Image: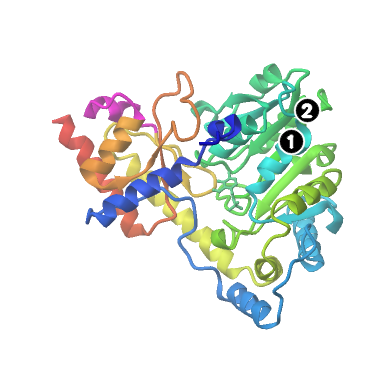
Amino acid sequence: MPSISRRSDQLGTENAFVVLAEVAKLQAAGKDIISFCIGQPDFPTPANIQDAAVAAIRGGKHGYTPSAGIAELREAIAKYVSRTRGIAVGADDVVVGAGAKPFIAYAILSVTDHGAGDEVIYPNPGFPIYESQIRAMGAVPVPIYLRESRGFNFDPAELEAKITPRTKLLILNSPQNPTGGIVPAKDMEAIAAILARHPDVWVYADEIYSRLVYDGAFASLASIPGMQERTIISDGASKTWAMTGWRLGYAVNKALAPVFTRWVTNTESCASQISQWAAVEAISGPQDAAEMMRESFRRRRDLIVGLLNRVPGVTCQSPGGAFYAWPNVTEACRIVGAKDSEEFRLRLLHETGVAVLADIHFGPRVPDEGQHIRFSYAASNEAIEKGVARMADFVRRHAK
Ligand SMILES: Cc1ncc(COP(=O)(O)O)c(C=O)c1O
C-alpha cells in the first residue's frame, strides 16, 4: 500500500463533526437525543436571499467567476466592512472564498514557511481548525490561554510574553468559539499597544460572529489606528444570515489580497457563483431577518444561562456573543463521579440523551481553569428547557 503523508496524519479535525456522527448513530438506533453540538443557526436562510440565488440560477449565472469573487460582491463587502469597522476598505482588498474557514489555512500559508520554526499564537480553548492548520502547514503552535476570570479573554501581558522574534501571526477570535466571550475594547487597545512594539506580527481577526454581539458594540482590532494594514479581517455569510451550507466567506487585507487570490485559484478556483449573488443580497438587502435571528439568540442566551446556573455544581457566565454557552462543570463532575468534562459529556449523552461538546474538543484543557462543556444554544426554547432539565436531573440523581 502506498504511504500517507505525515502532514495528513497530523491533520486534526473539528470534533463537533465526530460527536455529530456519534449522535446520528444513537438517533438511528432510536435514542431520543437533544443535541447542542452544532454551531449553526437553526433558521432557514432568509427568503430574499433564497430568491436572489434562484434568480442567479435562472439568469444563467452558472460559470466560474474571477478567483477573488464577482465585482458586485467585493464592492458590497468593501462598503459593509468599511461601515461596520469604521475603516476605509477598497473592493481590491477583498477576497471571497467558500466560507471563512479556508482563509485560516491561506493566512497561515501566506505568512509562515513550512519547517522554518515560524510561530503562530492562537486562543486556547479555540476553534480546533487553528491548531490543526498551524501544525499541518509546518508552523509552530503557541497557545494563549483564555481565562474565566477575565470573561474568557487572555491577559494581554501573557501575549507580550509569548511573542518572540519567530512569531509571524496572532489569531484573534471575537466573539469567540467555544466560550462566547468577546474581547472588550480596552483589551483590544492593550493588544494593539503590544503589537505596535512588534511590527512583524500579522493578525488574523476571525470575526465570523461579528453580528452576534449582545452586550455593547462589536470591536475590531482593525479599527484601531495603525492596525488595519497588518490585520486580516475574516467574516462571512454563515452565521449572520443562516447560510452555513452556502459556503461563502471572505478575507480583507490590502497586501495579502493578491496572495489569497492565488491560493483560491490554486484550490477552489472561486466560490460558488450562485452563493456569491445570494451574498450580495444578504449584505445589501433588508436586514430584518438577521436582526430577528440575533434577537432570538440573545433571548435564548438569557434562557440557557439562567437555567444552567440553577443546575447543582454548575456555574455559567453570560457570554457576550456568538451562540455558545461554556459552563464550568468542575463541581458537577465531582458530584456525579466523572473524572473530567469528557467523561461527564459521555455520560450525559448515554445516560440522559443530551449531546454537548467537552473542553478538550477545543484544545488541551487550560491548567487551573477547571472543567467546561460547550452548549450551542442555536436550538429551540423547548430543546433548551428540556435538555438542561435532563442535565439537572442527572446531577441531582447522583447527589443523593
Ligand atoms: C471561529 C470560527 N471561525 C470560522 C468558522 C467557519 O465559518 P465558515 O462557515 O464561514 O467557513 C467557524 C464555524 O464554526 C467558527 O466557529
Q: What residue is shown with label 1?
A: 203
Q: Is residue 302 above or below residue 105?
A: below
Q: Which residues are magenta?
A: 328-341
Point out residue 275 in the picture as x, y percentages from the top left corner: 65, 67
Q: As shown in the figure, which amino acid type bears the numbered disc 2?
A: Leu
Q: Quadrant of residue 350?
A: top left
Provide the residue designation for mark 2: 195
Figure coloring: rainbow
Considering every residue shown, the one lying at the far left of the view is: 400
| Residue in view at x 60 percent, y 27 percent | 154
Is residue 329 toward the left or the right of residue 272 in the image? left
- Image coordinates of residue 88 in percent, x first then y, are 85, 52
Q: Is residue 338 magenta?
A: yes
254 up-or-down from 315: above or below: below
Say above or below: 389 vs 153: below
Kindly indicate the quadrant of the structure image that contains residue 165: top right
Q: Earlier in the sequence, mark 2 or mark 1?
A: 2
Work out whether residue 147 can be spotted: yes
Can residue 90 be seen from the camera position used here? Answer: no
Question: Is 376 displayed left or right of 10 in the figure?
Answer: left
Q: Is residue 365 above or below residue 77?
A: above
